[in-house]
Amino acid sequence: MTVEPFGELAVALSDSAVRAVFADPRFSRSATFTGGGTTLNAGMGQWGASGMDGPEHLAIRRGLSAGATAEVLVAKRQEFEDLADRLIATVCSGDGHFELNAAIAEPFAVQCLGIILGTDLGDPRRLRRAVDATVAIEGAEAEELEHAVRTLTMVCLRAAAGGAAGQNGDGLIPRMLQQLGDDRATRRLIAHNVLPYVVGGIENPFVAIGASLIGLLESAEARTTVRAEPERVAAVVDELLRLHPTGLMSFARAPMEDVELAGVTIAAGTPVVPMIGPANRDPVRYENPDTFSLARPPSRHLSFGWGPHFCVGEQLGRLQLELLLPRLVRRLPGLRLSVQRSELVKRTGHIVDGYDPIPLAWGR
């Protein structure tokens, strides 16, 4: 199909088609940074592993994946819990009304990422706005995008320049400096590779916190389970992520040769957009796909992607929700939207979706 302003493109909607686009090595991320596909990358430049394929991509992924392994998250869990408690305590001291994104989601996403990287990333609001501009497919002016990219680049350069190699191995950047060297050229390379990690590590949890909490408030089964059965919180989070992925779409891929997908031949070079939202509700894979249910057999959904570009921050993203959601509903009795669901403002024109603002109230 032809879609303005993107030109000729194809859309993968089913679970099987999206998995094929994610996993088939004939579909290339780097090929979408030329021609009509460029627009689908929003303001994301070909930074680090996000725009690569093949062995070079895997080599960078291995380094970045070390920042949020299960072992690292166990070591950092108490810091994440303390941060969540501080943010919620501030809400508890208020008047019973607050805006979720500014009060909780934004600072929690930015400061958790800073803990993982081993650096203070600075003002959460300023940084999140810069990230927002880079993932805007439409609506961001060229000057705004240029300023956003410059802001994020300087944040990453400062983080790499200020890190100390071997500083108790505390944080991804110090570990990378220890392993790769700490000369100026290496620090710039680390900053280049960390930049897409910063974008994804801020925007995705920021959106996921809001979308998952709204989904939680809409499901009596989810709320009851989170309050009464701590051992099942991970299952609740997984089902919420299936129903409410951070974005309906993922970054486009383009086949390097003609490829048949779901019975349709996709010409080489045609951008293909994997639609995660519809795939996660594919009735061929999920019975009653639009319904929250903890009775579903285990099934790996696509909210974190699939294949070589599978999200390196998956475990961190899950942990953030598993820590925050129970605390919010337990410590803020009567938690609810303070507007009608239909009145929430949907973020549009972004690779990731969500709502902003999300006004909430609590108290009987």
Image (cartoon, helix red, strand yellow):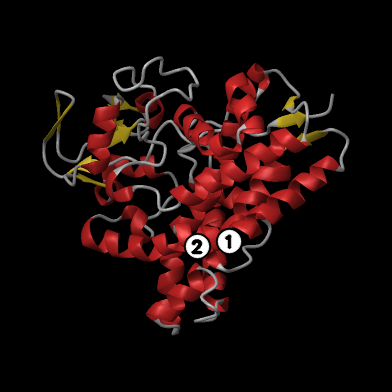
Q: Amino acid at mark 2?
A: Val
| Closer to us: 113 or 42 | 113
How dense is the environment of label 1, judged by Cα within 10 Å: few (below 14), some, or many (20 and up)?
Answer: some
Task: Give how far across and how far down residue 326 sits, in percent.
Answer: 65, 38
Circle 1: residue type: Lys
Q: Which mark is residue 76?
A: 1
Instruction: Say which mark, if any, is on residue 105.
Output: none
The residue sitting at the top extreme is 288
Q: Position of residue 23 (x, y in %)?
A: 23, 42
Up-down: is 212 above or below 106?
above
Report helix, strand or loop for mark 1.
helix
Tell how many labels.
2
Instruction: Please tell me which residue is depicted at 38% across the width and 24% down the height of the picture.
Output: 278
Rendered view: 226 above or below 203:
above
Q: Quadrant of residue 63?
A: bottom left
* Image point (18%, 47%), residue name: 25
Quadrant of residue 168 in the image? bottom right
Q: Residue at x 61, y 48 (%)?
A: 129
In the rendering, at what x and y percent does residue 363 appear? 83, 28
Query: Are circles 1 and 2 on residues that touch, CB within 8 Å?
Result: yes
Q: Is residue 187 left or right of residue 1?
A: right
Quadrant where the N terminus lies? top left
Residue at screen point 50% across, 21% down: 292
Q: Which residue is identified by label 2?
A: 72
Judged from the image, the secondary structure of the residue bearing numbered disc 2 is helix
Seen in the picture, residue 61 relative to 249 is either above or below; the reply is below
**What distance separates the C-alpha of mark 1 from that of mark 2?**
6 Å
> Callout 2: 10 Å neighbours few (<14), some, many (20+)?
some
